[in-house]
Image (cartoon, rainbow, N blue to C red):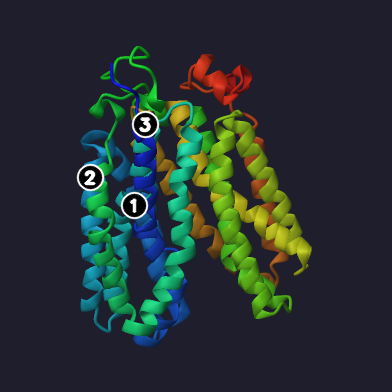
Amino acid sequence: MSERPKVFYGWIVVATAALGLFLGAFPIVAFSFGVFFPSFVREFHASRAAVSFAFTIHNLLSGLFAVVIGRVTDRVGVRYVILSGLAIVAAVLLSARAIGSSMFELYLFYAALGVIGSATTTVPYALVVSRWFDRRRGLALGGMMVGLGFGAVVMPVLAQRLIASFGWRNAFAIVGCAMLAIPMPIVGLFLKDAPGQIGLRPDGASVSAAPVDRPLDGLAWRDARQSGTFWLLIGVFVLLAASVHACVIHLPQLFADRGATAEKAALAGSVVGLALLVGRIACGYFLDRYFGGRVALVICAGAAVGIALLWTGSTGGAALAGAFLVGLGMGAEVDIIAFLMSRYFGLRSLGATMGFAFGAFVIAGGLGPLLMGIAFDRTGSYRVPLAAFGAAVIVAAALVMRLGPYRFGPPASDDATDRMGITNAAMRGTR
């Protein structure tokens, strides 16, 4: 009998997914948009609203097509979708060199990235990681999302240097080449759709634990979307996403309006970045040990407190603490989306359920800052929209409290679970 490998192959899948997210579409397209913004204004002699509309187009299409990408992933497999997505996104980024002086061409560029970009972001990667892990799914999803967190921190700085050295068109093209050279071959070599492909089982379970080729548990997409729990979760994700994105996007301006120095505003942004990384790992860790609804409730409550601290008008330690708590909510939400969708609706149609939820998250995240800006223009202050978003997060917390027990939770009790310190009560949720 062969000796079990010291490192479960699923963790190699997690590392591959983290790298893929780091060099996926979102870090260069969404997280770095502000870095490209001044170049677009100068190049196209356009207003800020006209340039911002390119980002709006991207977010709307990315949200709408996330569910399409998810359903395709359920049917044809994760590896095929990700490799195809990386190749197409890289080709679109390379095409930036051909963009002329028309804003329509820029809109078309961001529209194309919105349509296909979800194939290289959270939806397919969360699906494959969820297949590889059951008891440690939360931690695995958190580890995967660290790649996206580092992308949010590193890519804007890298993009700024590329723009300064080579121009914005070539900056996009260089990142496109990097996609072809780094994540594509690594995904091709190491990413496996499911542990059964190489004779393994989720979490590295023993051979006798379950059939290798058993069908995936879960509801069909039609049944999932007819569930009241599904729409309750969508409501939670929309309210939380709109609120935390609105606060994070407007945070530098909020600090500046209160007389803070540029250094203090930058520090607030760094605090949010740190919170994003902490939120991704910590949330995954706790999701494996406590009922996910309770974890989500803590995240919502923390975000509400954070918004309240921002509402006070301070730019000192209280405001920085508020920025950290809001950043935790932003960092933890995608982990919670993937985890709860897999626990309540299973793996059978996780691509579709995760795609729909992620799409709602992206669209709400795009609309929240817009609503914050409109409210500020009409009232001349951030206090009214902050109060409204604080109330929205409290509503999200109230909805979370209505969640019942998992439908597709891990086994309630076995030796492996006991070694991890997961209690039966945590597995049962609110039963």
The image shows residue 72 at horizontal and vertical percentages of: 25, 40
Q: Secondary structure at mark 3?
A: helix
- Mark 1 Cα within 10 Å, few/some/many (few <14, many 20+)? many
Q: Residue 247 is drawn in which quadrant?
A: bottom right
The image shows residue 403 at horizontal and vertical percentages of: 59, 28
Q: What residue do we see at 29% from left, 78% from top?
A: 169
The image shows residue 297 at horizontal and vertical percentages of: 65, 38
**Which of the two labelled residues, at mark 1 and mark 3, occupies the earlier sequence position?**
1
Query: Disc 3 vs disc 2: Cβ atoms closer than 8 Å?
Result: no
Q: Secondary structure at mark 1?
A: helix
* Residue 278 visible in the shown view: yes
Q: What residue do we see at 24% from left, 37% from top?
A: 77
- Three-letter amino acid code of the residue under disc 1: Gly
Query: Disc 2 vs disc 1: Cβ atoms closer than 8 Å?
Result: no
- Mark 2 Cα within 10 Å, few/some/many (few <14, many 20+)? few
The image shows residue 97 at horizontal and vertical percentages of: 23, 77
Q: Residue furthest top?
A: 208
Q: Quadrant of the N terminus?
A: top left
Q: Foreground mark, 2 or 1?
A: 2
> As drawn, is 70 to the left or to the right of 375?
left
Q: Residue 173 is drawn in which quadrant?
A: bottom left
**Which of the two labelled residues, at mark 2 and mark 1, occupies the earlier sequence position?**
1
- Three-letter amino acid code of the residue under disc 3: Trp
The residue at which mark 2 appears reads as: 189
The numbered mark at residue 132 is 3
- Three-letter amino acid code of the residue under disc 2: Leu
Q: What residue do we see at 41% from left, 67% from top?
A: 55
Q: Nearer the viewer, residue 72 or 323?
A: 323
Q: Secondary structure at mark 2?
A: helix
Q: Foreground mark, 3 or 2?
A: 2
